[in-house]
Amino acid sequence: MVESIIAPVTSILELAGLAAIALGTLWATLIAGRGLVARSTPPGRIFHDYRLNLSRGILLGLELLVAADITGTLIVDPTFESLGVLGLIVVVRTFLSFTLEVEVTGRWPWQARPPAD
C-alpha cells in the first residue's frame, strides 16, 4: 500500500524540484533582461540580483530533490548500498544548499540574522 503511494510522490517531488530550478532560472533571467532593457539599474547590480534570484530557484529545487531522494530511497529500497548513496547525495546537496544560502543571505544558515535597522 505505502509503496504504491511513495513512487508517485517521489516522482512529483522530483518534477517539482526540476520545475523550481527551471522556473527560477527563467524568472531570474526575465528580471535581469528587463533591467538591462530598461537601463534603470546599473549592470553590476543587475548581475548581483540575477545571481541571487537564480540561487533562490536552485536552492528550492535542491530542497525538493533531497526530499524526493529521501522518500524514494528509505521507503522503496532501504538497502545499505542505497542508504550510502542517499547519504552521499544528501551531503553534496546539503553542501550546495548551504553555499547557496550564503550567496543569497550573506550568512550561514546557523548564524543569527543581523538586527533590523
Image (cartoon, rainbow, N blue to C red):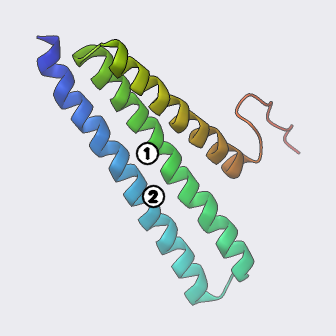
Q: Is residue 42 left or right of residue 23?
A: right
The answer to whether marks 1 and 2 mark residues whose Cβ atoms lie closer than 8 Å is yes
Which quadrant would residue 48 be assigned to in this image? bottom right
Q: Count every numbered label the image shows and give the total.
A: 2
SS of the residue at dot 2? Answer: helix
**In percent of the image, x 29 and y 13: which residue is there?**
78
Question: Where is residue 70 drawn, in percent x and y?
Answer: 37, 23
Identify the image quadrant of the C terminus: top right
SS of the residue at dot 1? Answer: helix
Which quadrant would residue 52 be assigned to in this image? bottom right
**In percent of the image, x 28 and y 25: which residue is there?**
72
Question: Where is residue 16 drawn, in percent x and y?
Answer: 32, 43
* Above or below for 55 versus 90: below
Question: Where is residue 56 drawn, in percent x and y?
Answer: 55, 51
Q: Of label 1 and label 2, which has the lower sequence position?
A: 2
Mark 2 crowdedness (10 Å alpha carbons): few <14, some 14-19, many ≥20: many
Mark 1 crowdedness (10 Å alpha carbons): few <14, some 14-19, many ≥20: many
Which quadrant would residue 113 be assigned to in this image? top right
Work out which residue is located at the far front of the displayed protein and give it. Answer: 81
Find residue 100 and name its label. none
Q: Is residue 48 left or right of residue 50?
A: right
Q: Is residue 58 left or right of residue 77?
A: right
Residue pointed to by mark 1: 61
**In percent of the image, x 39 and y 29: which residue is there?**
67
Q: Is residue 3 left or right of residue 60?
A: left
Q: Residue type at mark 2? A: Gly
Residue pointed to by mark 2: 24
Question: Where is residue 101 drawn, in percent x and y?
Answer: 65, 43
* Above or below for 106 versus 79: below
Q: Residue type at mark 1? A: Gly
Q: Foreground mark, 1 or 2?
A: 1
Identify the image quadrant of the N terminus: top left
